[in-house]
Structures are given as C-alpha cells and as structure tokens.
C-alpha cells in the first residue's frame, strides 16, 4: 500500500511517498512528474519546463555557477519575484506540520516526520546527507545512474559525463543519463541538482531552474 504526505518547504510544497516502510518519493508539487493523487488537492506554485526560467531577462539555463568558500543563503541571487518563502529558513521560524492521509499508520507518519526534519535541517544548513530509509523503484539503468548521483558529495558538482562514468558507462551515454537524472524520484535526497552541463552551465532541473540555483547556493555555489 502507498502512503503520501505533503510538507511545506522554503522552495514550495513537497509530496512525500512511502511503501509503508521506506521513502519512495519526494517531489516538488507542480513539477511535471509529481504523481497525481485521487481526491487530493495538491497546491503549489507551478513552473514551466525543466529548462525554463528567466532572471534579468536572460535564460537561467545558460547561467554558469562556481564554487565559493562561503555563502550567504539566497543572498542577492534570486529576485523577489521568485515567489518562494525563503524566510522560512530564519532561525527559530516555526515549521508547519505535515499533512497526511487519515489512514496513515503511526510508523509511516514517523517516517514522514523524519524526512521533514532532515529536509528542514538541510535547508537550514545543518545537514549535508540523509539517513532516512529509501526504496528506489526504476530500471537497472536508472538505478545505476541514481546511485552515481548519491555519490556526488555535498557542495560538489558533476557533469552528465561524470555521472555516466561513475555508473560504469561512457560519456557517450550522456543523453540517456540525462533522461534518467530527470526522472529521479527523490528530489534533494538523491542530489540531481548537483549535475551541471559542460562549463558548469545549469541546463535544466525537473523542479525548475530557480530551485536548482537556490539549492546550489545553499551548498556554496554562486553565479559565475
């Protein structure tokens, strides 16, 4: 049986899914591959395709990022109209509770609460990795790619060719690797936001390039 919960985050509401013992999905509500739930209202800011988005009239997908030694989270990168509640990261700010299905067992609610706490710690800069139990469903090829993504350290980046090599493939597999990266079912926890195009170009992100840029800045990157 599948269970689902909604949690607020500074970058928009998220949908969490579980098979009853493990986390199976974490999506930004509004992204193209977020599951639809019968009888449920999924409310969140919508965005266009994974490569859409403008800042100062220029396509975000063409922006380059670079690693810096220190970062001030979200400082002077995204314009005010980005629409995300980044004030939720202020110290001491009360985090809203989860919304779970009425028939959710206590053990599953505890799992969702653990996920929420770990994600909140990540957003607040207190966590760099996740310990929640995962069950990841996908083809053998996808599993290899997603495992390679999990090996990209916090604060580092990789190209699609790098991911292909880490998955035991060749750089010529970059295109199908990119497709598998885009179908990652566990946003942030499997860090597909750390994958960049050649020359450290942002290229795309299923959750929207605004989110990708903000997640990278959380981990110490800046435009450059």
Image (tube, helix red, strand yellow):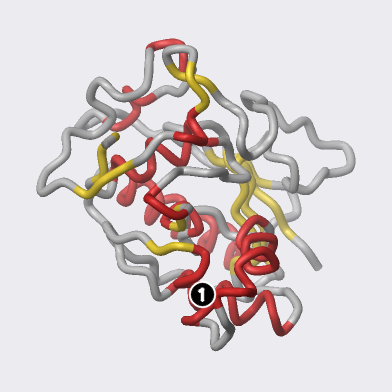
- Tell me: residue 79, above or below residue 140: above
Point 63% across, 76% down: residue: 135
Point 52% across, 25% down: residue: 59
- Tell me: residue 171, above or below residue 17: below
Name the quadrant containing residue 88: top left
Name the quadrant containing residue 3: bottom right
Q: Could you say which is closer to the camera, residue 174 or residue 121?
A: 174
Quadrant housing the C terminus: top left
Point 57% across, 44% down: residue: 204
Quadrant housing the N terminus: bottom right
Whole-percent x and y of residue 154? Answer: 30, 61
Left or right of 205 on screen, residue 166: left
Whole-percent x and y of residue 136? Answer: 64, 74
- Report the residue that reaches farthest toward the left: 69
Q: Under tag 1, what secondary structure?
A: loop
Point 38% across, 43% down: residue: 215
Whole-percent x and y of residue 84? Answer: 46, 23
Name the quadrant containing residue 55: top left
- Report the residue that reaches farthest toward the right: 38
Q: Could you say which is closer to the camera, residue 93 or residue 219?
A: 219
Count of all numbered marks drawn on residues in the image: 1
Left or right of 130 on screen, residue 102: right
At label 1, counting other C-alpha atoms closer than 10 Å, the crowd grade (few under 14, some 14-19, many 20 or more) is few
- Report the residue that reaches farthest toward the bottom: 168
Q: Could you say which is closer to the camera, residue 13 or residue 51?
A: 51
Residue that carries the numbered disc 1 in the rendered image: 133
- Tell me: residue 149, above or below residue 90: below
- Tell me: residue 55, above or below residue 6: above
Whole-percent x and y of residue 199? Answer: 38, 51
């Amino acid at each position: 049986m599948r269970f689902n919960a909604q949690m607020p985050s500074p970058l928009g509401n998220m949908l969490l899914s579980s098979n009853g013992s493990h986390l199976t999905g974490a999506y930004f509500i509004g992204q193209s591959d977020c599951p639809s739930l019968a009888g449920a209202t999924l409310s969140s800011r919508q965005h266009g395709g994974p490569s859409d988005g403008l800042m100062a009239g220029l396509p975000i997908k063409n922006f380059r990022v670079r690693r810096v030694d220190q970062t001030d989270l979200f400082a002077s990168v995204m314009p005010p109209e980005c629409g995300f509640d980044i004030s939720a990261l202020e110290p001491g700010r009360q985090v809203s509770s989860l919304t779970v299905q009425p028939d959710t067992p206590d053990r599953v609610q505890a799992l969702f609460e653990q996920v929420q706490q770990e994600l909140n710690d990540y957003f607040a800069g207190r966590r760099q990795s996740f310990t929640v139990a995962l069950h990841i469903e996908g083809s053998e090829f996808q599993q290899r790619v997603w495992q390679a993504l999990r090996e990209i350290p916090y604060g580092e980046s990789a190209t699609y060719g790098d991911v292909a090599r880490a998955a035991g493939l060749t750089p010529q597999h970059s295109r199908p690797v990119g497709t598998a990266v885009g179908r990652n079912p566990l946003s942030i926890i499997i860090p597909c936001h750390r994958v960049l195009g050649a020359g450290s170009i942002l290229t795309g992100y299923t959750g929207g390039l605004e989110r990708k840029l903000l997640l990278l800045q959380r981990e110490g990157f800046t435009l450059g």
